[in-house]
Amino acid sequence: MQMIYEYKKAKIKFILYSIIGIVIFLILVIAGATGALKQQQDQADDDSTVGLDVSGMFDKSVYLKHWQSVYGNGVLKDKADYTISVAQKYGINPALIAAIMATESSYGKSSAIKNDNNPSGQMVGSQILHYDTLEQGIDATGKTLHKLVVTRKLNTVQKLGSAYAPVGAGNDPTNLNSNWVPVVTQLVASFGGKSSDNLAASSSSSGGSIKQFDAIMAEAKKYIGQPYVWGGSTPATGFDCSGFTSWCYKKAGITIPRTSQAQWTSMKHVAEKDAKAGDLVFFQGTDSQGGMTHVGIYIGNGRMLDSEDSGIKYSDITSGYWKNHLGGFATAN
């Protein structure tokens, strides 16, 4: 009887261990799939966010004036600056986004923009896409245009029209798409676009950014979302503000001092109007120390990427706390 008991006991253990093994295997498979999905999503997000300087692509004063003329009484009336930030994020001429939204939303009056926060006529099949907020709809417009203009290189209105509003499309029974290219071309100019022959922000060769900008940003964007670490200067330790800038510059082949004040002292100071994407932007009075106490990587149009108390993130320097503490700009060029 003892042998039978021991046999049954061993059999039960075997079954339990087998079940535990199967459960662990399934957990590992699910975790691996989740990790792969996240990696794919991260790669997709990285591809869609380029952060190039677009200031040289349009006349902002003309843009703002025409924006008020077109959208001043509608739902888009206070979204001019937000649209510029989306254009900056996706490397697209702001005048193009404004022109397409005007064309596709009947100058901000369509039911799609009022009911679905969809300013650019984006659809899946015959179904208009819905966004929870208008900001989400504008951002989706920028992301779509990035894929078409930057990734697929449909970087003129003529080329873009062949994909965005193809003549003879099944969802255009009255042939309105034949007017799309001339209308958008005119609107790009009306919104201050300096050219409709290249709708994507160029890289560092444009003069709108320092020549190592792409390399600096490629490194910097790896760490977005990571927490601030006082005294940190490497990915292994985490970053404080000047540790972050010195590391990213180093990876682009530029050696600068370790602290924000030393970086300010050693670099060439430039006026705000002359600052280019990739330059550094400095702040004073952010702690009890004197001099320049914080630094970030300027990316143009009043935005920076920096390591601050809430982590490594994009920040607006044109209002609120950062505007009140702005100290100046400096370049490595």
Image: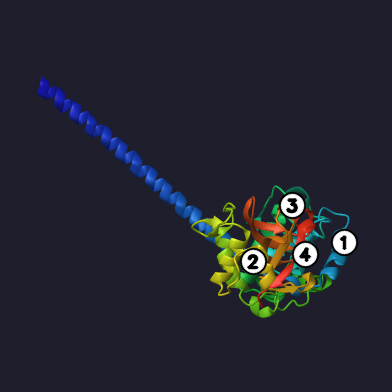
Q: Residue at x 43, y 50 (%)?
A: 33
Question: Under tag 4, what secondary structure?
Answer: helix
Circle 4: residue type: Ala
Q: Residue at x 54, y 56 (%)?
A: 238
Circle 1: residue type: Gln
Nearer to us in this view, 25 or 261:
261
Q: Residue at x 66, y 72 (%)?
A: 266
Name the residue tied to disc 4.
Answer: 98
Circle 3: residue type: Leu
Q: Is residue 188 left or right of residue 13?
A: right
Is 244 rendered above or below residue 275?
above
Of labels 4 and 3, earlier in sequence is: 4
Q: Residue at x 76, y 78 (%)?
A: 195
- The numbered disc on residue 146 is 2
Question: Under tag 3, what secondary structure?
Answer: helix
Marks 2/4: CA–CA distance: 14 Å
Circle 2: residue type: His
Of labels 3 and 2, earlier in sequence is: 3
Nearer to us in this view, 181 or 274:
274
Residue 228 visible, this orientation: yes
- Coloration of the structure image: rainbow
Marks 4/1: CA–CA distance: 12 Å
- The numbered disc on residue 68 is 1
* Position in image of residue 112 (x %, y %): 75, 53
Of labels 1 and 3, earlier in sequence is: 1
Of labels 4 and 1, earlier in sequence is: 1
Name the residue tied to disc 3.
Answer: 134
